[in-house]
């Protein structure tokens, strides 16, 4: 299985949005068994959530699955899995 990892600073906006968009594309193309998407940040505040603005913008595009996502700190394990 291929893996795509999106990384930004806090994992509350850009990378979370990119992950959600990629997951939508993967689902639309019925490629769930071939590609997985995830995201992480380099300077994460533990248990931080997706920003209000990110949730709002994604909702405008019909993507409503980022609201409860917790920020995830990148580490070697995540990098090795990507």
Image: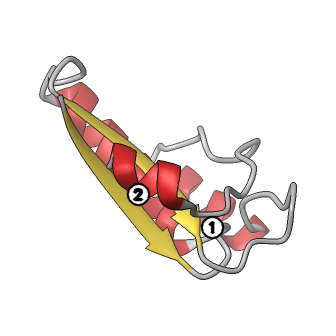
Q: Return the residue at label 1.
A: 11
Secondary structure beneath label 2: helix
In this rendering, the label closer to the viewer, 1 or 2: 2
What residue is at 58 percent from the left and 63 percent from the top?
Answer: 74
Residue 55 appearing in the image: yes
Secondary structure beneath label 1: loop
What residue is at 20 percent from the left and 29 percent from the top?
Answer: 28
Residue 10, position in %: x, y? 68, 76
Residue 30, position in %: x, y? 15, 20
Residue in the foreground of this view, choosing between 25 and 37: 37
Task: Work out which quarter of the rendered image holds the N terminus and state it.
Answer: top left
What residue is at 36 percent from the left and 50 percent from the top?
Answer: 80
Residue 61 appearing in the image: no
What residue is at 37 percent from the left and 43 percent from the top?
Answer: 81
Q: Vertical placement of 64 versus 44: above or below?
A: above
Q: Is residue 82 left or right of residue 70?
A: left
Q: Vertical placement of 14 versus 74: above or below?
A: below
Q: In which quadrant of the rendered view does residue 49 lie?
A: bottom right
Q: Return the residue at label 2.
A: 79
N-terminal of the pair, mark 1 or mark 2, is: 1
């Amino acid at each position: 299985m291929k893996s795509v990892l999106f990384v930004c600073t806090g994992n509350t906006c850009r990378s979370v949005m990119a992950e959600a968009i990629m997951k939508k594309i993967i689902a639309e193309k019925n490629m769930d068994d071939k590609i997985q998407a995830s995201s992480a940040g380099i300077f994460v505040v533990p248990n931080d959530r997706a920003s209000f603005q990110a949730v709002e913008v994604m909702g405008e595009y019909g993507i409503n699955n980022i609201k409860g996502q917790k920020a995830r700190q990148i580490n070697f394990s995540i990098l090795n899995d990507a």
